[in-house]
Amino acid sequence: MLPNRSRTSVLVFLLPPLLLYCAAVLFPILQSLFLSFFSWNGISEMEFVGLANYVRMLTADDIFWRSFFNALLYLAICLVLQLGGALVVASLLTSLRRGRELIKTLYLLPAVISTVAIAFLFVRIYSIDPVGLLNQLLHWIGLGSFERAWLSDVNTVLAAVSAPEGWRFTGLYMLIIYAALIAVPKELEEAAVLDGASKWTLFTKIRFPYIRPVWITTTIMATTYGLRGFDIPYLMTNGGPGQSSELLTTYMYKTAFTSTDFGYASTISVFIVIECLVAVGLILFMLKRKADS
Amino acid sequence: MITQTAPSTPRASTPPSPVRQRRRRKPSLYRTLSRVLIMLIVIVQVYPLAWLFLTSLRTEHDFATGDPFALPSSWTWENYARAFETGDLGRNILNSFIVTMGANILIVLFGMMAAYAIQVLGFRLSRFVRGLFLVGIIVPVQIALVPLFIDYSAVNLLDTYQSMIIPLAGFALPMSIYLFSSFFEYIPRETYEAASLDGAGPYRIFGLITLPLSLNTVVTVVLVNSIFIWNDFIFANTFVLSEDLKTIPLGLQNYIGAMGKVDWTATFAAVCVTITPLLLVFLVLNKAMIQGLESGATKG
């Protein structure tokens, strides 16, 4: 603590950021919680309905559950592409002698592109008429039977809208993991190599345990970003066809701004927040416990 | 999976040897495999963007009928002319610029102030306040959409620059505070004590010591946040209706015509125009940006 500080000075520095944070983040959370107990379309009188919205959400709303499981699958695909891809590329990168900086830059490139542009791009990549990149590629490598309109097929649409999100941010996580990997002390690795450790043992016994704290951070980042994923599915399919690519976030958005059911939309968004908190808790619990054992 | 299978081959034939000797050998199978793999992955990351650019130079007919992988049969800048006719790209870029600047100023200034109050000045509830801010890192932005929409319409803030800047800055603030506090930890206490003995109060210390020392962190925070703010879709889409205020992501949507008919080549031209500013900044400053992203998460 600074010796010369005064109570006023603390307030001068703390109040403006705290006010902004309250106005944009904390107060809206409380407001959502409050609204979730009401039925309100934004115009008529607000009507207190107690837990009715929650009961409806958990017991009577098929679309909600559909979106929930879709969101989990979307999350799983994003995590595999982002964290798996990031780990593989970061590991490979450490074995390169030249061109690391260039590859890092190129790999990160998609992260700079807006989601709207990415949605446009992938609509064309998946398209069948005129034939898009993916279908053409499948045709060339002799998998022509898999050609399809990826975004109108109910079996593939969810994976098709998840992949761009994974593609977009894998570079970000690769950078973080790479930075952690090159911080692993060289003596540790060399000693293990002298002892005859294979590359795989080197990775599982030395490198990975060493980067575990960073791995936990990136897993939390990727998971919370995955659970709030919205732009790309909303823009590419708007949840369709039917509800086959509906996520909780897109469902919430439509409930709020298409059906103007503000109360019920708030209930869903409260659920999304709880889901994020639970996910972070679970990750910490699982990864920390493994580290202790 | 890949790391699992690739490494075993060369190890079987060569006895374990010190790393330095291995370096001088011919490229091993493992090395070659990993190079090929890296090249493939980089192509997957970069080719779609290159394709986007190539398509923006194709004629419409070529796009509708040709092989998507082929180079354009004739090159044309027509699409760019149509792109500028259809939308108000200049206006969109200006709006994105205003929002990005506004939010960044708030994020940097307020982030630094809060971190200074919590980390340097210190007060009784500082740990609690810090925790309160940090929770914001994991809160999804969707929770704020309905409440802010209602609040904005109550105070007539809908359809303004502020309606985008406030939540963008608010949700980025926790990370900024976190980065600044972790940096402030490294400024030795003696620096502050010496300044205090010379009679400098908290305001002068902030302006003369903390602020100039944190310039690197400022660059990090600005670069990282700019990517997200420049490309923000959800807040702009929810709070902005008039053409005059539309940022780039909303402007691009205008290219979807009535009945969902899209002039693709012109759209891709527009996409190329709008990603250029940020792409240039990124390519020029990519060292600083990459460092920022790396340090941002590894400190945690």
Image: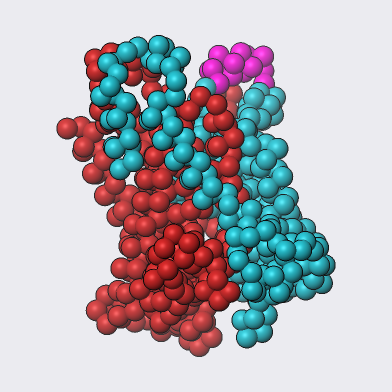
Chain colours: A red, B cyan
Left or right of B100, for residue B175: left
Locate the C terminus of chain B and report the quarter of the image it occupies. top left
For the N terminus of chain B, give its image quadrant.
Answer: top left
Residue A55 lies, in percent from the top left, at: 27, 78
Could you say where residue A257 lies in the image, as x and y percent from the top left?
Answer: 52, 78
Residue A185 shows in this picture: yes
- Name the residue located 64 percent from the left edge and 69 percent from the top edge: B66
The region drawn magenta spans B187-202
Residue in view at x 58 percent, y 42 percent:
A106
Q: Per the image, is B240 magenta? A: no
Check the image and report above or below for B275 versus A67: above
Left or right: A289 with respect to A174?
Answer: left
Residue positioned most to the bottom: A44
Give the overall secondary structure of the magenta segment. helix
Question: Relative to residue A127, is residue A197 drawn left or right?
Answer: left
Residue A246 visible (yes or no): no
